[in-house]
Image (cartoon, helix red, strand yellow):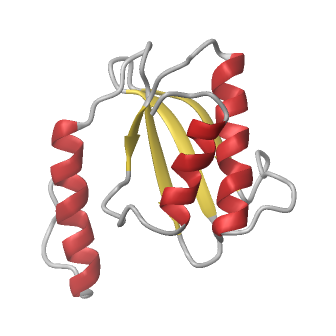
Amino acid sequence: MRKKIGKLADVGAERRLRRRLAIRKKVNGTAERPRIVAQRSNKHLSVQVIDDTAGKTLLSVQTYGKNAVAGAKPNKEGAKVVGAKVAEALKGANINTAVFDRAGYKYHGVIAELVGAVRENGIQV
């Protein structure tokens, strides 16, 4: 990841960016064990599965756009649905293990439910 340029106006966003960079130093995805990244906002939830060695996104699932999961919202119930869809897609690609990148978010609420749903559906995270 590139370094930030200048200061961010929001102190919370600056702290999250610092946490995100610290996490990315330690977490790395491979073809056998890709990195699952969650991005959340007040309106949407997006999950990408990334192979860092090749620099490619293997798949993405979100609550908006073409790959939208029907009826999923950015709350805990929606995170369960999105997590199940991610696990189903990973099984379809013959991937059984992955690493989780929380992207600076607390491991709580929607993020915890998302990873819990991936684990419940047979992917070792």
The quadrant in which residue 32 appears is top left
The answer to whether 72 appears left or right of 36 in the picture is right
Position in image of residue 107 (x %, y %): 38, 61
Viewer-closest of 32 and 56: 32
**Does residue 47 show up?**
yes
Position in image of residue 55 (x %, y %): 38, 25
Q: Which residue is drawn at 43% across and 67% down?
A: 108
Q: In which quarter of the image is the N terminus?
A: top left
Q: In which quarter of the image is the C terminus?
A: top left
Position in image of residue 87 (x %, y %): 65, 33
In the displayed structure, would residue 31 be above or below residue 85? Answer: above
**Does residue 1 show up?**
no
Position in image of residue 26 (x %, y %): 18, 38
In the displayed structure, would residue 24 be above or below residue 95? Answer: below
Q: Which residue is drawn at 56% across and 37% down?
A: 119
The quadrant in which residue 43 appears is bottom right
Viewer-closest of 3 and 43: 43
